[in-house]
Amino acid sequence: MDQKSVGNRIRAFRERRAWTQEHLAEAAQVSARTVQRAEEGTLSAESLTAIAGAFNVSVSEITDAVLAQETSSIIPAVYYEKSSTLDWLVNAFGFEILEKHLGPNGQIMHAELKVSTNGKIMCGSPMPGSNIATPKSSNYVTQCLYVFVNDVDAHYKRAKAAKAEILSELEDSYGHRRYQAKDPEGHPWYFASPRGKN
């Protein structure tokens, strides 16, 4: 397995626990710079062993090739009536379009967006006759997505500059620094970083 993938796994383990790099360094009894380099993909066997011990997992749970390839055990599917909303998500929230397949009338047949280091969502358009609708067209919201980002303050500024509707301002809550915004079709999103990371 390449070192970059190992670094991504270390970051994923850390963010799941809402730890900063400093928290992990203290738990592993290594320097914060060692953790930073590890997440960048540069680490020794000794550092990897120490970091795995801090997470209370085996080294193989970090380095296992199958685990390194998974993005998530849950991939949300979000529906949009307008394919142009996908471009808005890229501009405002910094997502990356991995796949985009449109139908003859411009509806989204299937799309995949990268939303973070190891997360993604699938997108489609509500089909005629289905019981699926966007919050904007139905006036109902039944879910909210919660996305971890590297720098939530910078993310907030980007979303504001793109005229995203801010539902709640930046705040420190539940160990995270976060804010909530709404996309053009009414879906609410939380974006967060572990507190003390920025």
Image (tube, rainbow, N blue to C red):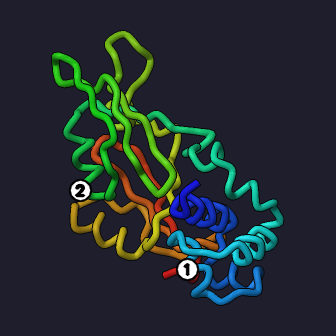
Badge 1 crowding class, 10 Å Cα cut-off, few under 14, some 14 to 19, many 20 or more, is some
User: Quick check: 104 above or below 65?
Assistant: above
**Circle 2 sits in a helix, a strand or a loop, which is it?**
helix
Residue holding disc 1: 36
The amino acid sitting under disc 2 is Asn
**Residue drawn at point x = 17 percent, y = 16 percent:** 104
**Residue drawn at point x = 48 percent, y = 82 percent:** 198
Q: Earlier in the sequence, mark 1 or mark 2?
A: 1
Percent x, y of residue 30: 71, 86
**Mark 1 or mark 2, whichever is nearer to me:** 1
Percent x, y of residue 27: 77, 81
Q: Say whether residue 44 is left or right of residue 54.
A: left
**Residue drawn at point x = 77 percent, y = 71 percent:** 49
Q: Say whether residue 177 is left or right of residue 186.
A: right
Percent x, y of residue 153: 40, 76
**Residue drawn at point x = 32 percent, y = 31 percent:** 137
What is the number of the mark on residue 91?
2
The amino acid sitting under disc 1 is Gln
In terms of depth relative to the viewer, which is nearer, 34 or 73? Answer: 34
In terms of depth relative to the viewer, which is nearer, 61 or 73? Answer: 61
Q: Among all residues in the image, which is located at the extreme top?
A: 129
Q: Quadrant of the N terminus?
A: bottom right
